[in-house]
Image (cartoon, helix red, strand yellow):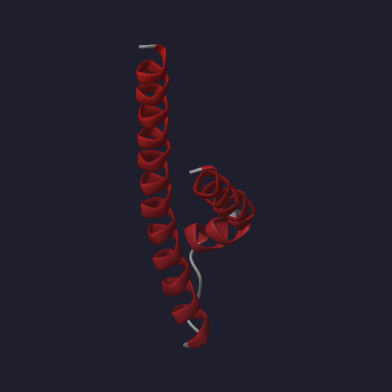
Amino acid sequence: MNQKNDADALRENRQAKLKELQLQQAKLKELQAELERINTKIKNNEKLSLDDTKFLGDLGWLTALSVTIASIASSL
């Protein structure tokens, strides 16, 4: 019976990690779309808004997010 409980707990843990990974991937896709929009503005020599500039300044945490996603994926 203990093995069944352990297997169930492991399965639930994996499901939770998979769900977290999917949420993080969705966030990453949104951020990539925003970055692509800004890149288009830059290529077209358009003026960047304050929000665009702030987004570019926050790219450090985007890197941290991608590392988090990779670590979650590797633990599955």
Where residue 40 appears, as percent x and y from the top left, is 45, 81
Q: Is residue 70 above or below residue 44?
A: above
Where residue 2 appears, as percent x and y from the top left, is 41, 12
- The foreground one among 8 and 51 is 8
Identify the residue at image location x=62%, y=49%: 64
**Residue that lies at the very extreme toward the top in this rendered image:** 1
Q: Is residue 33 above or below residue 71?
A: below
Q: Is residue 2 above or below residue 17?
A: above
Quarter of the rendering occupied by the N terminus? top left
Q: Is residue 19 above or below residue 7?
A: below
Image quarter of residue 13 = top left
Where residue 34 appears, as percent x and y from the top left, is 42, 65
Identify the residue at image location x=35%, y=36%: 15
- The foreground one among 57 and 6 is 6
- The foreground one among 39 and 30 is 30
- The foreground one among 68 and 46 is 68
Count of labels in the image: 0
**Residue that lies at the very extreme toward the bottom in this rendered image:** 44
Left or right of residue 17: residue 70:
right
Identify the residue at image location x=39%, y=25%: 7
Identify the residue at image location x=52%, y=81%: 42
